[in-house]
Amino acid sequence: MQNLWTDKEAQNYKTELELRVYSSRLLGRDPSLVLHGGGNTSVKITKKNLLGQDEPILYVKGSGWDLVSIDAPGFAPVRLNHLLELARLEQLSDPQMVNELKTHMTNASAPTPSVEAILHATLPFKYVDHSHADAVVTITNTAEGKKRIEEIYGERAVIIDYIMPGFDLARLCAKQFAEQATDKTEAMILLNHGIFTFGDTAKQSYDRHIEFVSMAEHYLQQQNAWDIKYTEVSLVSDSANIIQLRKDISVAAGFPVIVKTSDNQKLKSFSQRDDLARISQQGPATPDHVIRTKQLPMLGTDVTNYVKNYKKYFKTNAALSKDSKSMLDPAPRMLLDNKLGFIAIGKTAKDANIVEDIYEHTVDIILRAETLGGYKALGDKDIFDMEYWDLEQAKLKKGGSAPEFTGEIALVTGGASGIGKACVDALLAKGAAVVAVDINPAISDLYNRPDYLGLVCDVADEQQIINAIDQTIHHFGGLDMLVLNAGMFPLSCKIAELSTEDWRKVMQVNLDSNLIFMREAHTALQHAPNGGRVVMIGSKNVLAPGPGAIAYSASKAALTQMGRVAALEWGGENIRINTLHPDAIFDTAIWTDEVLQARAKNYNMSVEEYKRKNILKTELKSSDVADLAAAMCGKLFAKTTGAQLPVDGGNDRVI
């Protein structure tokens, strides 16, 4: 394992807390140590309080912060002496403990301290680093894990049997560390959980962490349990199966979910193993991952059977957790199948990505442990207690309202600019995962976020449309909302002068492409958990055409008629189709300054007057159309289909 500390970088961090930030980020850079909010770090600093008295404060990583990007405000300052007093109590419920942590901070606006704050406080060192290092967890997840750890570290590490994070763990560690630690102790190993290292300086604690994890890696290498070979696997999964699977999982969960088919070769290879049922169904590498990934992967696509077994598991273990009042949704969070490979499931695209990342590391741990004598996870009781931990239950009950389209998927055509891009933004803001297609290559890099996929697509090419729908389904699991915006506005041309070629080109882009999108998206829209929705971007020209735009006006009129027919045909399938007719949206690429000035001059107006040439005397923007398009996909229009709505500030010809 590479030590990332450099004295040159460290010189930029002057204070004890700043050095804590620096070394924490170094740990966070390595996903084999810290993954998606895992691990925590702390530093003990003496500060003067309001009364001018010196007071020892524990700065410990706060809830919601990741080590890779943590900054000073991410550390919660808690009065150290109070934490040490709490550690002497015989018992303390975890909710009470959290209350004590929060009410004894020196900064009320700081994040909630880590549940391991008391544990950090009891370790008699200035700096403490904790991670769920893959190599260490691998060794502890074997039948002789404890014996192997003793062999590797000897007197340099105190070894603690697994107990769930919280007050009981802090109290046990304080007691056993005091009893077992010597002047040679430099680390503490929590079996099936991870590793703590400590030191008088940030560098010393970090260096020890890297050294101790490297020792575990070296041990695995010596045992020929480090390099795992994965075979290249080519899987062709049917989109229809994925669509149905997402519908089934969403029904089981009680809300729409993202279902992501993984391209990861390691995970696909793992899904093909003959011993998959045995090695994948023991439990996670560390119970800390339970909250993110549920207890076990679903094998195959039988959601009904999985839910049945999950509920049976809950009833069997309910007595193990006195404070567990309700069951988390029984839907799986990951799936292993010899045809589909590995599928990650989450309320959001980010959640699904986290599941995939965690399980990629879990696969390494499982297979290395198998080589080392056999993977052996913790028993059901420990896993159940973690999944139904009272702190996690309280967090779920507290919850908070999610954005309206959380777990839903939208596809927007012509999404690189203008109304299309504004629709992408509006849907993302409402929590949807969005696929945007455009002929402009810039669509691919429009956003770098897990809930966005940009696809280069020429809508005049039928196969490219089919591919775009297929990629949408494989990337997010289905399709709930379709915004048909892509189109072209040709130069003004009278009927007598319009060539057949130009006519057909406009029809191909503005009309034919939308028929193909509708047809190819139909099955996915049928299976949308909350019903399918289509919003067509028509034009004022449908209601009030003008001379010189026959191809454009006719194509938009035909598109509107297609929407009306679709509303009649698809209404019984809980798919609603509505159309917007915008006019005078000037913040798009076709409206250059030169064009605006020329048009304004035509009407003997200033550019600003021309922009407001409507009954309400208001300027319209792409975002106005997009906000209404998003609203049409939402609850406000849940009982509306086949509607046409102008977005034009009021036009006397339309009215």
Image (tube, rainbow, N blue to C red):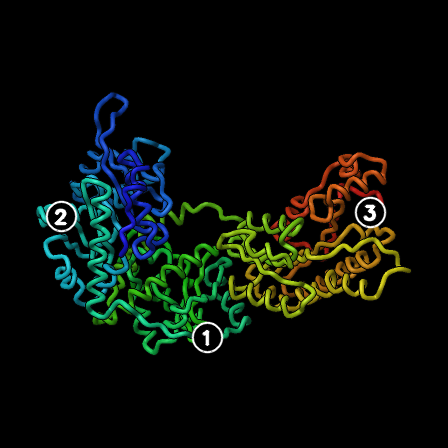
Q: CA distance from mark 2 to mark 1?
A: 50 Å
Which mark, residue 177? 2
| Mark 3 nearby-residue class (10 Å; few <14, some 14–19, many ≥20) | few
> Dot 1: within a 10 Å radius of its alpha carbon, few (fewer than 14), some, or many (20 or more) residues?
few
Find residue 118 and report its horizontal and vertical position in percent.
22, 42
Residue 572 on image: x %, y %: 66, 65
The relative height of residue 300 versus residue 330 in the rendered view (above or below) is: below
Name the element at disc 2. helix
Callout 2–callout 1 Cβ contact below 8 Å: no
What numbered label is drawn on residue 140? none
Number of the front mark, 3 or 2:
2
Residue identified by numbered label 3? 654
Tell me, yes or no, if residue 64 can be seen here.
Answer: no
Residue farthest along the bottom direction in this orientation: 274
Looking at the picture, does residue 338 appear above or below residue 392? below
Q: Look at the picture and state if 298 lies above or below 426.
A: below
Please state, as top left, top right, bottom left or bottom right, where the N terminus lies in the image: bottom left
Q: Is residue 273 visible?
A: yes
State which tag comes first along the sequence, 3 or 2.
2
Query: Which residue corresponds to the image point at 67% horizontal and 46% vertical from the top-left?
Result: 622
Q: Quadrant of the C terminus?
A: top right
Cα–Cα span, label 1 and label 3? 55 Å
Q: Amino acid at mark 1?
A: Ser
Quadrant in the picture for residue 228: bottom left
Give the number of the mark in front: 2 or 1. 1
The residue drawn where x is 27% and y is 42% is 7
Q: Earlier in the sequence, mark 2 or mark 1?
A: 2
The percent coordinates of residue 477 (x first, y second) are 52, 64
Residue 128: x, y in percent? Answer: 22, 44
